[in-house]
């Protein structure tokens, strides 16, 4: 498996269907991986990106707290597959002297990674699969005004 590190570039609203799109950028190649996410996950990612601390823990804050309380630490997130327009991810945790891997939706994994300050990676095969004509056309047709806040 060949992976590349990506940076969370932000969230945009898909002007065609009013869905939220998480944009991950490979800093080395400049490739952008768009992943459509739900409203709640977009909100959780936005809160982490804007360093907003809610008065009570949200789901991803709770997850980060549980991981720490159990003596583990989030090492990384890997978006490892794309199958029938569904992305898959793994969260890699260090507990004691062993690594534990947990299945996750990419949006939840990224929301956790932002809180845990751990890197996000994408498998090269996912980048290749995602660079289909439909995604490329979507990216090419975006205009500056389409990049609105996902709040």
Image (spheres, rainbow, N blue to C red):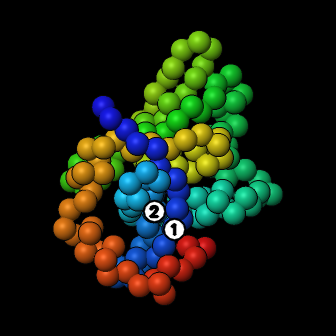
Q: Position of residue 97 (x, y in %)?
A: 59, 12
User: Between disc 1 and disc 2, whose residue precedes?
Assistant: 1
Dot 1 crowding, Cα within 10 Å, few <14, some 14–19, many 20+: many
Count of labels in the image: 2
On the image, which quarter does residue 151 sit in?
bottom right
Q: Position of residue 129 (x, y in %)?
A: 23, 52
Relative to the observer, which residue lies in front, 20 or 78? 78
- Specify the label residue 11 is tagged with: 1
Q: Position of residue 66 (x, y in %)?
A: 67, 33
* Residue drawn at 32 percent across, 81 percent down: 141
Q: Is residue 111 left or right of residue 84?
A: right
Label 2, secondary structure: give it: strand
Q: Residue furthest right?
A: 55
Relative to the observer, which residue lies in front, 25 or 87? 25
Relative to the observer, which residue lies in front, 49 or 58? 49
Q: State yes or no: discs 1 and 2 in contact (Cβ < 8 Å).
A: yes
Q: Is residue 116 above or below residue 70?
A: below
Q: Position of residue 144 (x, y in %)?
A: 47, 84
Q: Is residue 96 left or right of residue 51?
A: left
> Which residue is the site of mark 2?
23
Q: How far apart are the alpha carbons under marks 1 and 2?
A: 6 Å
Q: Is residue 84 above or below residue 92?
A: below
* Residue drawn at 59 percent across, 33 percent down: 74
Dot 2 crowding, Cα within 10 Å, few <14, some 14–19, many 20+: some
Residue 104 can be seen in this image: no
Q: Is residue 146 left or right of residue 48?
A: left
Q: In which quadrant is the N terminus drawn?
A: top left
* Residue drawn at 58 percent across, 23 percent down: 94
């Amino acid at each position: 498996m060949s992976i590349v590190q990506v940076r969370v570039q932000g969230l945009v609203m898909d002007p065609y269907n009013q869905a939220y799109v998480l944009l991950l950028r490979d800093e080395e190649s400049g490739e952008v991986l768009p992943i459509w996410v739900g409203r709640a996950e977009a909100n959780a990612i936005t809160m982490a990106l804007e360093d907003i601390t809610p008065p009570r823990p949200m789901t991803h804050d709770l997850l980060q707290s549980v991981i720490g309380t159990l003596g583990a630490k989030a090492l990384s997130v890997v978006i490892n597959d794309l199958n029938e327009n569904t992305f898959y991810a793994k969260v890699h945790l260090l507990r004691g002297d062993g690594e534990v891997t947990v299945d996750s939706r990419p949006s939840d994994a990224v929301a956790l990674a932002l809180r845990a300050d751990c890197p996000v990676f994408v498998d090269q095969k996912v980048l290749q699969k995602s660079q289909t004509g439909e995604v490329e056309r979507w990216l090419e047709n975006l205009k500056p005004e389409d990049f609105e806040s996902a709040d």
